[in-house]
Image (tube, rainbow, N blue to C red):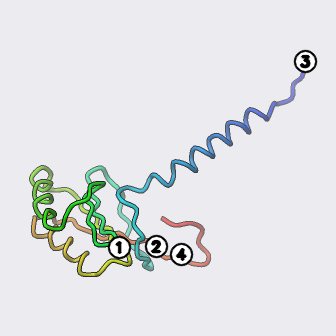
Amino acid sequence: MNSDINVTPLVDVCLVLLIIFMVVTPMLQKGVPINLPVTEEPERTPDTEKQLQISVKSDGSVYLGPQVVRKDQMQSSLEEIHQKTPDREIAVKGDKAVKYGDVLDVLKACREVGFNNVGLIAQPKKSPGSEGSV
């Protein structure tokens, strides 16, 4: 009888799990991929299922969640969402290369419709001693 531990299956399972996590992790970001602006210490709020992410890409296109919306339809789309869930949280992600006025137009439309909990998303600045980002 051989009483040694066979490490080969353990290593195989660990490598498969590592590959799965490496593939899935980039997909965890909600909404449209955006090059976010960097700030010193952004306020952290948890992602919830009620949160609607509005993304403004560098070309000025606006996305409500994963769907692209024309600027003239944004107000009516937000009104429909507000009628269904008036207490919904709104998180606006603006690309750092987009014009400031485009992001302000989205914020103004959210406030005019009646959403009270509207915030901006930013990426935390990496300090020399920190490992990774939030």
Residue at (59%, 72%) from the top-left corner?
Answer: 130
Where is residue 119? Give x, y as percent.
27, 69
Disc 2 to disc 4: CB gap under 8 Å: yes
For image coordinates 56% across by 66% down, the residue present is 132
Q: Earlier in the sequence, mark 4 or mark 1?
A: 1
Badge 2 density bin: few <14, some 14–19, many ≥20, Cα 10 Å: some
Circle on res. 124: 2
C-alpha gap between disc 2 and disc 4 = 6 Å
Secondary structure of the residue carrying numbered label 3: loop
Kind of residue sitting beneath label 4? Lys
Between the residue at mark 4 and the residue at mark 1, the CA separation in whole angstroms equals: 23 Å
Nearest to N terminus: mark 1 or mark 3: 3
For marks 3 and 4, the one nearer the N-term is 3
Question: Whole-Å distance between the Cαs marked 1 and 3?
Answer: 66 Å
Q: From the viewer's perspective, is residue 3 above or below residue 48?
A: above
Q: Residue 110: x percent and y percent?
A: 16, 67
What amino acid type is highlighted by mark number 2? Pro
Q: Which mark is residue 126?
A: 4
Tag 3 residue: 1
Q: Amino acid at mark 1?
A: Ser
Mark 2 → mark 1, Cα distance in angstroms: 19 Å
Q: Secondary structure at mark 2?
A: strand
Q: Which residue is mark 1?
A: 58
Q: Give left or right: position of 89 versus 1.
A: left
The residue drawn where x is 21% and y is 60% is 69
